[in-house]
Amino acid sequence: MRSNASQYELVAPGSLDAVLALLAAEPGVWTPMAGGTELMVALGAGRLAQRKLVSLWGIDELRQITASKDWLTIGAGSTFTDIRQDAVVAKEFPLLARAASWTGAIANQNRGTLGGNIVNASPAADSPPVLLVYEAEIELVSAQGSRRMPYSEFHLGYKRTVMRQQELVKAVHLPRGRRLPVEYLRKVGTRIALAISKIALAGVGAMHAGKVSAVRIAAASLRETPARLSATEAALLGHALTQDRIQAARQALLQEVKPIDDIRSTANYRAHVAANLLEEFLEQMAASES
Amino acid sequence: MSAAKMQWPEIRFKVNGAERSVSVPPMKRLLDVLREDMGLTGVKEGCGEGECGSCSVLLDGVLVNSCLVPALQANGCEVLTVEGLATNGALAHIQQTFLELGGTQCGICTPGMMLAAESLLRKNPQPDLDEIREGLAGNLCRCTGYMRIIDAVRRASQTPTSTAASVREETVRK
Amino acid sequence: MGDMSQTRIVGTPALRREGIDKVTGGARYIDDIALPGMWHGATVRSNIARGAIKDIRFGAGIAWDEFVIVTAKDIPGENCIPLIVDHDQPVLAETQVNHPEEPVVLLAHPDKARLHEAVAAVEIDYEPLPAIFSIEESEQQRTIVWGEDNVIKHFLVEKGDVDSAWLRAAHIVTGEYHTGAQEQLYIENNGVIADWSEADGLTIRGSMQCPYYVHRALLRVFDLPTEKVRVIQSETGGAFGGKEDYPSMIAAHAGLLAKKAGRPVKIIYDREEDLAATTKRHPSRTRYRTAVDREGRLLATDIQVDLDGGAYATVTPTVLSRATIHASGPYFCENIRIRSHAWATNHPPHGAFRGFGSPQTIFGIERHMDQIAKAVGISPEEVRRRNFLAQGKTTATGQEIRDAIDLPGMLDRALKISDYEAKRLRFARENATSSVIKRGIGVVSFMHGAGFTGSGERYLNSLVGMEADAAGHVTVLVSSTEFGQGTNTILSQVAAEALGLSCEDVSIAQPDTQRVPNSGPTVASRTTMIVGRLVQDAAYALANILREKKLLGEGYSAAGFRAACATYTERFGALRVEARYQAPKDIFWDDAAYKGEAYPAFAWAVYVAEVAVDLRTYSTQVVNFYALQEVGRVINPLLAAGQIEGGVAQGIGYALYEKVVWKDGRMSNSQMTNYIMPTAVDVPNIEVYFDETPCEHGPYGAKGLGELPHDGPAPAILNAIQNATGINFTSIPLLPEDMYLRMVETPEPGTMETVECVK
């Protein structure tokens, strides 16, 4: 334990409005903390620079998962276990339940939250690629009001997001009724469970009359943010999945990704395996019509 | 340092069924509150980064790594540690099966591992092998290779009076 | 003693003696203990690999007067941890550091939370010196970092006439194999509490394997007589060799702080410090050049073994010894040459880890046997069958095998148990049409010497004590420690069996150098065989004392024993015996020529691994594992199987997951999130089988088995991967990134990286 806990403040105003009021009153002073699965690791390692923290844990309005006709709204304070246990997620957004089940292990899933995972903005995070292919929207809130945007616009660069100083993530909205018949998700980690992703690929799509009629592909750890692979999608949309087309899509992927060497893996491995996962997804696509 | 102590918020919570309260820095790890302030040294620190699971406790019935829970967030909660598993001196079923089936060797992972097992069995009383492995994936054991831990969980998932066949053949003699 | 006669307790799954404490949270490990007035200690360590210490400054912003500060100048005795090479490793660096994380300054403070900031505020200026980080760099001898020539130790083993065989070989097969560093990763980090008083001297409590190693070291560091140092082992949460010699260092540190502070001091490492600063398994490079005849029989084998020892010698000479002796495997060959070297580098010193040199060379020989099979055109199992050692044949050191070992029979059984042949055929069929998942099965055979090498046990001169009180309760006095492997239970069973009592009538005293004699270190798979035998001897001696006084007959009941003890203690006082190790008369060992009986006994094994390789992700799953071993006599089948399963899991980690990532000599992945060990999802079903051929040396025929299971899994897995993919991977850990590199970026035209010379 490389920090002195007595040098830190943690307050729990207890309601969303109270937290937002605090963030507005003292901008840049208070760092929100939900389940603590990121920030407490930093504390233990002696790298938690932020001394004043405001707790989001136990704020019920952040932890609801509610379904309306067109949207499933997942409160940012929902844990990965909440997501795994939700019936609508299981039925209509199964890739998200799967991603949640691969995040750390049970104890981490019980405390880690979707909002925390998104705000931490690691390119390796497990849920973001799924949110991207499901075309999620993200709702940010502050004392001044709220704004909502496609989640694809949320990340600006490595660990940089559009969030302003006083803002919190309030919820993620998943559009219902747009389900595509083929759904694919695979995570490659350092081991099967309790692993940080080396790369992960999420894909949804449909075939019509032998051609790709819809496709959305997103990845973790292939760029400095979670990212849609739009060049790869463009190489596929409207085409039949011939061997040549699949190779062209592989090449498009290899061109548009920029993975790195780090302590867990290498850039070349990541790129090459991502292309392999793409092929696995496309095999499923090709098989879906028959 | 003692003057500063007076500012610390009071954390009230139930630990192993007993009402407790402590005045500690709000960011003190629940792990340290349990070990130092409550004397519950059965909760262990193996990594301090939420990987090994030795610090696992049940917080409001839910398995968590106590090294990652700040004390303030345990306010008003119920905590179960290994010390709370036995009732009136009688070992819980999971403790009995760990003891009898070789689920514990050096013992340092055992408290967290049993709580992970307890958490699993409360949610899923009859887990299959894959579900047991998944339920224990966040608890690292360096001694056992997990085989006898899995046996112990499987035996614990059978009712105490069950006469189900013994779990695996252990030795073969010439 | 050496037969399989009926036993009541030996051979049964007696419950772990300290099991109830472990499942109730009542077991007290060192960090669970606090002494009144205790302070906490921390270590300031070097952040470069090698350099002269120019200046130490204590930075601003810290109330230094609240701290106790210790440097090398505070050491009352000698600034060294004596082990094998004396005056080598310092307790605290004084003029120069030779590895990253080398201890330089110690701090103590009443509030543990204040220490980290203070450690960060100590600034040390260095004048860097050139540093080396590999066997290859060290053997070039351009930069000398240890001794005259970087060679910590070397051996030459010669049997027969190797050079005469090359010309008559049908095949000459060469191969080079690499193994990486591996962290023991006990879940309980290193920790001690030291207490000092003028009257009693130094008392150490802590997590350790060898209280008397610590005791011996502290006598020198503190310049104290024997009775002024007391070392007590506390409940230890895993060790695996990582707490064999390292505790002497942390104990010396805590002791220095306690002496200067005049109060108890506790030092507990956190995971990052323990990973970065303490010992690892020695990385290795082995080179094999083997001449075989047309039928694949070994004519000659020339082996080079090279280990990376790190910056100081510590246990390296003995690791090299074991690596050397095990390098030719369980095979008979008339002409063997083994040249081995341990090279110094500027990594933190490497040390003991289960197997202690043999996993490294057994990896080499077992991978190599599969290449020989391929060159000759026979199966991996057949090449082994044609070369096995047997009773009457001699090993590389000329030791005649006394065991009536039937390795061909064991091989047959292992192949049958694992359904090897059917699976091999099925996998070959399926692999032909499967482009993504390739399955494979691999077999290895190996042996592991139990006990200290050669004259080692004679040198250790182990002593065991046993007492009985008026109620007939027996206490076993040994310095052998429990750290999960079952020492307490095994020794209780042996004592209870020998005395005609039950386990509950026997206690094992806490290893405390003030109370127990030195029964040797708890290492080298020696405890059951060597110390257990002494416990058995002591038990018989105890009963005989009562018989001599006519208080017991030839046979007796437990009640009779209790009555006899009551009478004896009333009439004669304390009832206590000792048993001293007696070296078997016919053990011959030449330490200079490294010839003779290297070990009193060997355990033998055949392991089979089944794998599935995913060619999309280049990752390998171990799908099934079968472990068959001959271990003399199984004292406790539950504990024994647990040892095998745990060792296999560590071997799986060694092969596929556990990589130490070095950066400028320091372990850069020093967190559990980045040093990957298998979880419950990664370890497959492991089937364990024991053969028992009683050995005359151990109690009731037992031999050692603690380290054996770490020798086999890695080569078995890589043999299986070769079966699955056709590729000869020669280096571990074999990560998916390594498999990808080999298969995609640098594919070889052929499938073998061996050189053949066919006549």
Image (cartoon, coloured by chain):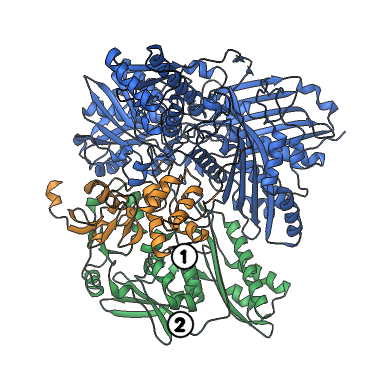
Q: Which mark is residue C528?
A: none
> Which chain is the one coloured green?
A
Name the foreground residue: B3 vs C55.
Answer: B3
Chain under label 2? A
Rendered residue at 38%/53% (across/down): B93
Give the quarter of the image for residue A231: bottom right
Return the x and y of residue C595 as percentages of the image width and height.
64, 17
Give the quarter of the image for residue C604: top right
Name the foreground residue: C255 vs C362.
Answer: C362
Q: Which mark is residue A101?
A: 1
* A269 sits left or right of C272 in the view: right
Name the foreground residue: C495 vs B61.
Answer: C495
Return the x and y of residue C674 as percentages of the image width and height.
47, 50
Q: Secondary structure at mark 2?
A: strand
Name the foreground residue: A39 vs A259.
Answer: A39
Return the x and y of residue A256 as percentages of the image width and height.
58, 68
* B3 sits left or right of C233 in the view: left
> Which chain is the one coloured blue?
C
Disc 1 to disc 2, C-alpha distance:
21 Å
Chain under label 1? A
Q: Residue tagged by mark 2?
A: A175
Chain B, hue in figure: orange
Q: Do the residues at discs 1 and 2 belong to one chain?
A: yes
Tell me if I can see residue C677 in this picture: no
Return the x and y of residue C8 as percentages of the image width and height.
48, 32
Q: Secondary structure at mark 1?
A: helix
Give the quarter of the image for residue A70: bottom left
